[in-house]
Image (cartoon, grey):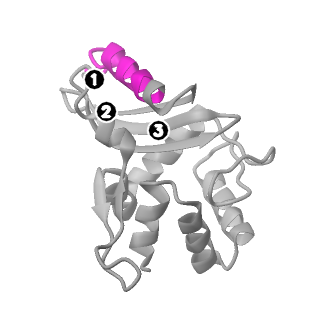
Amino acid sequence: VSMTELLYGAVLPSGAEATEALAIVTAGSEEAFAALMNEKAQALGLKDTHFVDASGLHDENHYTTLSDMAIIMQAALDNPHCREVLTSVNHTSPATTQNPEGVAMTNRFLYRIRPQQTGNVDIQAAKTGYTAQAMNCCASFGVSPKGRNLICVTSKAWTGDFCIDDHVALYSQYADAAN
């Protein structure tokens, strides 16, 4: 499986097996990859973020804030490969012997938010997450009608639908102010 396909598997369906594989190939282990992530967080000037694994599963020593997550989202969007994956609604991996038709993946947030009213903001990218502690979370990127880039980060939504509702409400309320 290529690194690109692992990135799609990590982002679109939030595949922990893909994040683990990326970590091992990139740094030799999840622990070593987490150390690289912490170095990057420091380089980005993040003061309230610490990683212990590649998947984001709960650990008391694995944490971030919504504002730090917005900076992480911007850094990811600055990387062309990450931007391509974060802006994909659907992706099908190449065919393999095990999966002759490939594996279909969908960014459910982008798939479900696109038809909704978002104050005319064009939602172009998103990454969701879930833990029992943080509940449904999302970082999304949109462009206002006048071309201003916007990032929205939320947590603690009871369901994935409520998470989308939160983003719709925030973009709808603040889109005009962003112009």
Give the SS element for disc 2: helix
Side of 48 where 112 appears, left or right: left
Q: Mark 2 points at which residue?
A: 113
Q: Quadrant of residue 127?
A: top left
The stretch in magenta equals 163-179
Location of the N terminus by quadrant is: bottom left
Q: Name the residue under label 1.
A: 118
N-terminal of the pair, mark 3 or mark 2, is 2
Q: Quadrant of residue 151?
A: top left
Side of 65 where 97 appears, left or right: left
Give the SS element for disc 1: loop
Mark 1–mark 2 distance (CA, rounded to whole Å): 8 Å
* Labels 3, 2: front one: 2
Majority secondary structure of magenta residues: helix
Q: Name the residue under label 3.
A: 139
- Front-most of residues 105 and 63: 105
Location of the C terminus by quadrant is: top left
Give the SS element for disc 3: strand
Residue 113 in the image, given as x and y percentages of width and height: 31, 33
N-terminal of the pair, mark 1 or mark 3, is 1
Residue type at tag 2: Ile
- Residue 2 lies within the magenta run: no
